[in-house]
Image: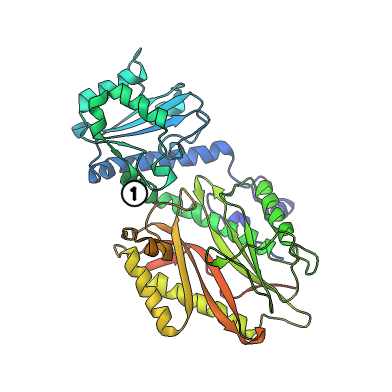
Amino acid sequence: MTLLKWAALPLLFLAACTGPRCAAQKAETPQLLSLSQQIALREDWLDKRHGLLLEMMRRHGVGMWIIVNEEFNDDPLTQFVAPPRPYAGNRDIFVFVDAGAEGLKRVALTGYAEESILKFFEAPEEGQSAPEALKSLDSRYQPKAIALGIGGKRGVTRSLTKDGYAYLLDAFGAEAEARFVSAAPLIEEYLDTRLPEEWEPYKGMVELTDAIVKEAFSSKVIVPGKTTVGDVRRWLYDRLGALGVGTWFQPDMRVQRKGGIPAKSRGFLAVAKEELVIERGDLIHVDFGISYLGLHTDWQKMAYVLRDGETDAPEGLKNALANTNALQDVLMVRASRPGRSSADVYDETMAEMTARGIEAQVYSHPLGNHGHALGASIDFRSSTRKDTPKPLREGSYIAIELNTATPVPEWDGQKVAVMEEDPAYLTQEGWKFFVPRQEAFYLIK
């Protein structure tokens, strides 16, 4: 199988050597940025992100924002508000203050205030303890609202520990508690705002995710009648390890076959058992993503295992995939625009699918610094929970995650679910994929 030309992924990989022999080696094992180069790139992004923060704080009425990082229990925000390095200072506190005409004031109260921290933050005055520094900042700038990681609905927005809260309350004094507010709206905008500089590396990550899945769903990995679901999962884990990238969730596979009655789980096709052997005629699906540079992908694709004598998937299966492509078209182009309500986009998409007679589910979610990131979800579960609709934000990344169920004549009318998931970004013309979507099943011979 011909793999993606890894060297074409901008800012994602570096050549370790040159010449024909090295080119062949790179095709098998791309050379990722070294850890120090990854840190340097992310610190460049951090500097630009800090440049956007003051306006965000003012939009949300926040005078001071505090992130408390506990040793061995890192706050999930720390690597996105401070240099992405290990922190082992018992309790490290990062403070952002709207200093009025002075602009944004950034202070780090850390156990080890070394050079990398001081590129982004001021240290407290010599001899000043962390509680004294917090009290001094409060007295000088008198913020009306002190935003903390409390009261949010997601882990990254409610991450302040009980002891961390007590520490801040003791430092500021009991009277300040009335000014403690949830930082959740600020955190959401901060994490859902993508930088232009992140786009090319992220596109490379999506291309890498695609290439890994294409290799996993090939005859190089899968031998019909022999290879199990567990074998493919373990191959994916090992491939991640060889490449030096991570993942934020377990790679999962689903298998559909003629005459089989797939089990359901939480309204979806259930994940296949690891001992299940992949057979000819199976339609297989993978849910997979990678983690790199503080960003995450999410990717679902499907392959058909050819029967003896077949050169392509049956027409009924191809029609099922075409229905899912039609669902993508409606959601991405006709329904979505910056500023539109996520609920309106969902309702309009489902109404058109109903009018076409296509059975559909949509459960798309934001992507970025987290796999299930913060921002506007276009998701049937949000609709049933009556969550407050959110406007789509231009430049946001999303996992266009959805499926259709279609009766397949060649499978005696059995319904087949075609599940797809692709990272996309929002423009004035709607969502756009980072790489082309799947319009034909991968074929395993």
Q: Is residue 293 left or right of residue 387?
A: right
Figure quadrant of residue 158? top left
Q: Is residue 419 above or below residue 229?
A: below
Residue 134 visible in the displayed image: no
Residue 179 location (% of width, % of height): 24, 34
**Residue depicted at x 45% and y 34%:** 83
Residue 194 location (% of width, % of height): 39, 51
Q: Write down the residue under mark 1.
A: 189
Residue 276 visible in the displayed image: yes
Q: Secondary structure at mark 1?
A: helix
Q: Is residue 20 above or below residue 147?
A: below
**Residue depicted at x 28% and y 45%:** 56
Amino acid type, label 1: Glu
Residue 410 location (% of width, % of height): 66, 86
Q: Is residue 260 left or right of residue 433?
A: right
> Residue 418 versus residue 112: which sits nearer the camera?
418
Q: Is residue 372 above or below residue 383?
A: above
Mark 1: few/some/many CA within 10 Å (<14, 14-19, 20+):
some
Figure quadrant of residue 348? bottom left
Tag count: 1
Say which quadrant the N terminus sits in: bottom right
Q: Is residue 178 left or right of residue 358?
A: left
The single residue placed furthest to the right in the displayed view is 226
Q: Is residue 266 above or below residue 81?
A: below
Figure quadrant of residue 33? top right
